[in-house]
Amino acid sequence: MKILIIGAGGMIGRKLTAALLKDGSLNGRSIAALTLADIFAPEVPPSQIDIVSVANDLSAEGAAAELIKDRPDVIFHLAAIVSGEAEADFEKGYRINLDGTRLLYEAIRQAGQAESYFPKLVFTSSIAVFGEPLPAVIPDTQVLTPLTSYGTQKAIGELLLADYSRRGIFDGIGIRLPTIVVRPGAPNKAASGFFSGIIREPLVGLEAVLPVAETVRHWFASPRAAVGFLIHAAALNTESLGQRRSLNMPGLSATVGEQIEALERVGGSDAVALIRREPDAKIIEMVAGWPKNFDAQRSIDLGFSGDNNFDDIIRAHIADELNGRIGKP
């Protein structure tokens, strides 16, 4: 089996790569070759599997065709610029998140016209495809009403995924990821970044800024869960999806206050004391329209599974990123 990961240099891409290499197979088939692509060539981990790393701007002319020239059996499309950056730079957001996606879909269509080529394609969408007014618990049948450019770009990507799949161009599945916490490394430009920051920074003795009220409720999943979603999606028989190709992933609904309570239980009161309240009107307005809770029974029935509680999410971060220790490095 040949696998292509687009956006392999990002946090989820790196963790997905590690998981695939550790197992050496996907859906019972051995991985023979793995191509890692991102705007900068991703680091190649040691492996017995044939790995190619390439720098590729998916929105550039001919870039998508170059990526699929070896005809990967499974394509993970993770590449995107994040919500805050897409909102701040309108043209860049549409170029990367929409044009790049459509060019990839088109490259696969052109390849399929020239020869027999029908890959599995896993597209990472987002709960940002939903916006107010919303019910307290969002069902699988909720109409897409994005209120950000990022959410709009992801919603269009979902519609294209369904249409290209309907027409037999590829076998597509879209997974709407909850907000991923705790994200390791430096903060990114995502408007949701503070959800990770108020956990990540205090655990290593650094101050974190909280721009919203503790009553704000949101929908979360851990990096471990996100990788599990991707791998399960790639192995899933999509006949059970029908024409509704995109799924809400399982997650945890929690308030910021509940996050902080979990931090205190796991990391102690000294960690909580490092959270500084600094309201940001722009972020407050943006977050107010975000989804708070989901009924993800459809994906659960299809075998997807998420996190049990927020304490476990924090413990997983400590184990995976901090070598099991907390406090100043």
Image (cartoon, grey):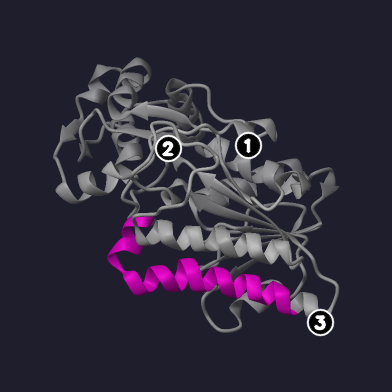
Q: Main secondary structure of the magenta part?
A: helix
Front-most of residues 260 and 101: 101
Residue marked by disc 1: 299
Residue 321 is situated, as x and y percent measured from the top left of the image, at 47, 36
Q: Residues within 10 Å of mark 3 (few under 14, many from 20)?
A: few
Q: Amino acid at mark 2?
A: Val
The quarter of the picture where the C terminus appears is top left
N-terminal of the pair, mark 2 or mark 3, is 3
How much space separates mark 2 and mark 3, taking CA atoms? 43 Å
Looking at the image, residue 19 lies above or below residue 53: above
Say how many tags the image has. Answer: 3
* Residues at marks 2 and 1 touching, judged by CB atoms closer than 8 Å: no
Specify whether residue 266 is painted magenta: no
Front-most of residues 100 and 72: 100
Q: Give, as a single range, the part of the protein colored magenta.
A: 83-110
Residue 48 lies left or right of residue 277; in this view the side is right
Q: Amino acid at mark 3?
A: Ala
Residue 154 lies left or right of residue 163; in this view the side is left
How much space separates mark 2 and mark 1, taking CA atoms? 20 Å
Residue marked by disc 3: 114
N-terminal of the pair, mark 3 or mark 1, is 3
How much space separates mark 3 and mark 1, taking CA atoms? 35 Å
One can see residue 80 in this view: no
Q: Residue at x 35, y 63 (%)?
A: 86
Looking at the image, residue 40 lies above or below residue 133: below
Residue 181 is situated, as x and y percent measured from the top left of the image, at 42, 37
The quarter of the picture where the N terminus appears is bottom right
